[in-house]
Image: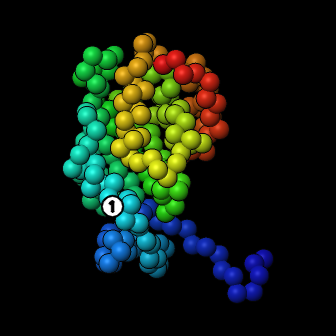
Amino acid sequence: MLPRGVTRARQLLPLRLWPRRSWGDGSIMASMQTTGRRVEVWFPKRLQKELLALQNDPPPGMTLNEKSVQNSITQWIVDMEGAPGTLYEGEKFQLLFKFSSRYPFDSPQVMFTGENIPVHPHVYSNGHICLSILTEDWSPALSVQSVCLSIISMLSSCKEKRRPPDNSFYVRTCNKNPKKTKWWYHDDTC
């Protein structure tokens, strides 16, 4: 039984987010549809600036999938092409970025998505990426562009295409959110 005056939180429907109004400080107010009512959500100027930076000056081999941000500023898909002269040259991948309301103080959820997940010792077949800056080494000073550059660098330095040794077990038992995994960073050789 809940204490007097406390009601159960309503479960959110899939996010439907659209800009409503812009404020002088650069923040936007957006509406998010929930079960039977609207909730106002604030998104900081920082996320907007990073979106514009990625659109106007993306890292080499990366482009923002414009359709992915039409309905939600909190979920982006970045199209990526393997760097020239690497094992992944000419291959195309997609990265999914999901931002919480605590971004940039909380790291984005980043994973490979789509039909082509790179075969790499730090990338699981479900798209989860074992990269310290996505979890415990995250800093608000980092950005989407710096994450993209780190992933390009990680792939470019790979000397052998192979899955992590525990791939099968991990994919069967992991949470859908890679940020809920307690990663063990022990290999800086690839």
Residue situated furthest bottom in the rendering:
5
Q: Is residue 171 above or below residue 44?
A: above
Name the spot of residue 134 as percent of width and height, x first. 51, 41
Q: Is residue 56 visible?
A: yes
Residue drawn at the location 23% of the way across and 46% of the way down = 57
Q: Nearer the viewer, residue 17 or 151?
A: 151
Task: Describe the colour scheme in one phrase.
Answer: rainbow
Q: Is residue 180 above or below residue 19?
A: above
Q: Say which quarter of the image contains residue 18.
A: bottom left
Q: Nearer the viewer, residue 164 or 57?
A: 57
Q: Which amino acid type is marked by label 1?
A: Gln
Residue bearing the label numbered 1? 48
The count of marks equals 1
Q: Is residue 69 above or below residue 135?
A: below
Residue situated furthest top in the rendering:
160
Q: Is residue 113 visible?
A: no
Name the spot of residue 89 as percent of width and height, x first. 27, 20
Could you classify mark 1 by the number of other residues whose Cα lies within 10 Å: few (under 14), some (14-19), or many (20 or more)?
some
Residue drawn at the location 39% of the way across and 41% of the way down = 146
Q: Is residue 156 above or below residue 178?
A: above
Q: Could you tell me which quadrant the N terminus lies in?
A: bottom right
Q: Is residue 78 left or right of residue 142?
A: left
Name the spot of residue 78 as percent of width and height, x first. 31, 43
Q: Say which quarter of the image contains residue 15.
A: bottom left
Q: Nearer the viewer, residue 142 or 130?
A: 142
Residue situated furthest front in the rendering:
141
